[in-house]
């Protein structure tokens, strides 16, 4: 268990972290997610002992400390491999430089390195140099080298940020499987929402040095607690109106909302994910809004539809499965009717979260 209590950090007049309180259970894979400047890397460096907090304390295994020594393994975005060493030598480095009384015999080191290379699927590359590897392979070497010293905490700072999209997707799935095998507490920083949702057991969303929400991927995506989290974790459509008696009123339309049905507000905004926007040709559907189809992006398993409302000229985005799209046979410039489902409403008070 890692417990962060009231952690704050300033860089001159800029406050990077503001009274962070966070518990990370042992064996969990946690993503620190947020935009640039949100404080996620600063928080990771403080956990690693590379930066000192101005206020607060970190408890590791119920002991207060700001220096974990060799209990923490840190993997940087740009690998930081020794160019003059082979893959085998890079992985073995941390084991060879240990104090004599802690150092394993040469044969044991060789066996352990071979086991790690098998774990990261690089046993055939042991004699190669970093320059002879792809970016994804170099990142796996960096992870193996970090795991060699058996850290109790594994920290990764944008581990796949320098890689192309396809390799990044393959490696994050690999990281998930690796974590399940080694069961080391892992914290990784990312600004990639899809990466965090795909890999993490739990997501900690930061903004302007504050934890704005934490929870499982399902919780933060489907039950965001603020407009910022809703916007940051995916595409949304906005429906502005008046909130009264569990419904959002806009013109002649009124839509059921999720959440507190007792709230009232003269200025409210409904948030709807693209896949929760109904498209129909049936003008008799109650509380539907006419819209022109302006663009269709059809590839893969889903189809994205861009629409322009006839009444307000506002643009919306819908997402259909390939089966739904084929059934409807929608065409560009066609007039259809849209209706929001799963409407999540925020009022001006929520924007101060």
Image (cartoon, grey):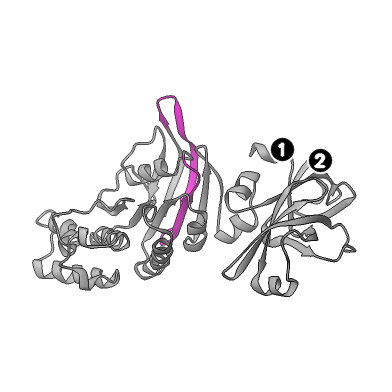
Is 229 a magenta residue?
no
- What separation in Å lies between label 2 and label 1 (alpha carbons)? 10 Å
Which of disc 1 and disc 2 is earlier in sequence?
2
Relative to 294, is 27 on the left or the right? left
Picture coordinates of residue 41, whole percent (x, y): 40, 44
Query: Measured from the top left, where is residue 292 in percent x and y?
Result: 77, 56
Left/right of residue 156 with respect to residue 241 in the rendered view: left
Query: Residue at the spot x=14%, y=58% of the render?
Result: 85
As drawn, which residue projects farthest toward the top?
13
| Rendered image: mark on residue 170 | none
Q: In which quadrant will I find the C terminus? A: top right
SS class, disc 2? strand
Secondary structure mostly seen in the magenta stretch = strand
Task: Indicate yes or no whether the magenta region holds residue 27.
Answer: yes
Task: Judge by depth and name the residue closer to the eye, 84 or 264.
Answer: 84
Viewer-closest of 133 and 37 = 133
Q: Position of residue 21 (x, y in %)?
A: 49, 43
**Left of 208 or right of it: where is 167?**
left
Residue 176 sits in which quadrant? bottom left
Indicate the quadrant where residue 222 lies: bottom right
Query: Is 25 or 235 nearer to us in this picture?
Result: 235
Please name the residue shown 21% across and 73% down the image. 124
Label disc, if present, on residue 349 of the rendered structure: 1
Counting from the top left corner in percent of width and height, residue 251 is at: 88, 46
Circle 1 Cα neighbour tier, 10 Å, few/some/many (<14 / 14–19 / ≥20):
few
Q: Which mark is residue 265?
A: 2
Q: Which residues are magenta?
A: 10-36
Nearer to the camera, 260 or 343: 343
Pointers 2 and 1 in contact (CB under 8 A)? yes
Residue displayed at 50% across by 46% down: 34
- Say above or below: 184 vs 82: below
Residue 102: image quadrant is bottom left
């Amino acid at each position: 268990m890692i417990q962060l209590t009231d952690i704050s950090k300033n860089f001159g007049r800029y406050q990077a972290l503001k009274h962070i309180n966070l518990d990370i259970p042992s064996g969990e894979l946690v993503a620190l997610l947020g935009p640039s400047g949100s404080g996620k890397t600063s928080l990771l460096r403080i956990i690693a002992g590379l930066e000192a907090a101005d206020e607060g304390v970190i408890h590791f295994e119920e002991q207060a400390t700001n220096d974990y020594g060799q209990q923490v393994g840190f993997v940087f975005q740009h690998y930081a491999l020794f160019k003059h060493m082979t893959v085998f030598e890079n992985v073995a480095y941390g084991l060879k430089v240990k104090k004599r009384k802690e150092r394993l015999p040469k044969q044991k080191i060789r066996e352990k390195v071979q086991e790690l290379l098998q774990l990261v699927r690089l046993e055939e590359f042991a004699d190669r140099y970093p320059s002879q590897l792809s970016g994804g392979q170099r990142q796996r070497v960096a992870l193996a080298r970090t795991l060699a010293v058996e850290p109790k905490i594994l920290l990764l700072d944008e581990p796949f940020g320098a890689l192309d999209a396809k390799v990044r997707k393959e490696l994050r799935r690999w990281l998930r499987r690796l974590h399940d095998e080694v069961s080391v507490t892992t914290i990784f920083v990312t600004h990639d929402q899809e990466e965090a949702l795909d890999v993490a057991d739990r997501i900690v969303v930061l903004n302007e040095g504050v934890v704005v929400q934490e929870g499982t991927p399902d919780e933060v995506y489907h039950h965001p607690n603020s407009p910022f989290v809703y916007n940051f974790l995916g595409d949304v459509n906005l429906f502005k109106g008046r909130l009264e008696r569990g419904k959002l009123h806009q013109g002649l339309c009124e839509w059921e909302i999720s959440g507190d049905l007792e709230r009232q507000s003269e200025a409210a905004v409904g948030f709807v994910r693209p896949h929760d926007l109904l498209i129909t040709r049936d003008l008799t559907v109650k509380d539907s809004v006419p819209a022109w189809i302006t663009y269709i992006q059809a590839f893969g398993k889903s189809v994205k539809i861009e629409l322009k409302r006839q009444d307000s000229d506002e643009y919306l985005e819908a997402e259909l499965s390939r089966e739904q799209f084929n059934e409807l046979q929608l065409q560009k410039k066609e007039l259809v009717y849209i209706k929001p489902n799963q409407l999540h409403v925020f009022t001006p008070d929520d924007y101060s979260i």
